[in-house]
Amino acid sequence: MRSDEYAAAGDLAGRGYGSIVSQIHETHAAIAARVFGSLGSEARPIELAHDAIAGLAYGSTAAFGRTLIQVAGQGVGLAQPDDAGSLERSPVGRVAKGALNGFYGDLLSAERNSLALEMAVRVGGCDLPTAPADVAAAFSEASGRLVVFVHGLCETEDAWRLVARGGVGGRGAGAPRPPTYGER
């Protein structure tokens, strides 16, 4: 992974950690409110102290953990060589990026996060510049027929190769390789 991808992953993981701590705090607060509500007004001073202490504890835990995770992502990124390959260079990396974008794509795109996927024409696992000469060179043997594939949520163009790899509707030993979606 490239250094910017580690930093972007650290940022996203830190936010996720903070969100989980917030949800736990909200659950704790809801349970405490029911308990204190059943105790009556005599317990109000204790409830106020409890809520203040819990708020401070959860707030500081979320902030410290979020910051620690984000800094760790940046630190690991700084340790990467300048020529480190992108996460997109491996099928597992592309699947992970597709899943992240399926869940957080709007957020990643709005913040220009390095893990954001933008709509693109792709060839060989890479974005293709869409200048007419670049498209003509990449598809020099193309016919006059055009097919546009739009994959589902949380996927990348790798989903169109699943049948060819035996992923969906797999094949038994010795069976011929089924055609890819494109070949069909």
Image (spheres, grey):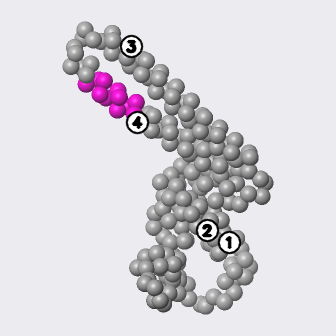
**Amino acid on which the number 2 mark rests in the picture:** Ala
Q: Earlier in the sequence, mark 4 or mark 1?
A: 4
Residue 151 marker: none
Which residues, given as a range, are shown in magenta? Answer: 23-34
**Amino acid on which the number 3 mark rests in the picture:** Ala
**Amino acid on which the number 4 mark rests in the picture:** Gln
Q: Is residue 25 magenta?
A: yes
Q: Is residue 1 above or below residue 91?
A: above
Describe residue 11's horizontal placement relative to residue 77 as left or right: left
- Tell me if label 3 and label 4 are in contact, CB under 8 Å: no
Along the line of sight, which residue is nearer the eye, 40 or 106? 40
Say which residue label 4 marks: 23
Say which residue label 2 marks: 120
**Amino acid on which the number 1 mark rests in the picture:** Leu
Residue 49 marker: 3
- Tell me if label 1 and label 2 are in contact, CB under 8 Å: yes
At which x and y percent is residue 169? 40, 79
- Tell me if label 3 and label 2 are in contact, CB under 8 Å: no
Residue 128 marker: 1
At which x and y percent is residue 180? 51, 83
Q: Please state which of the two labelled residues, at mark 1 or mark 3, is closer to the viewer.
A: 3
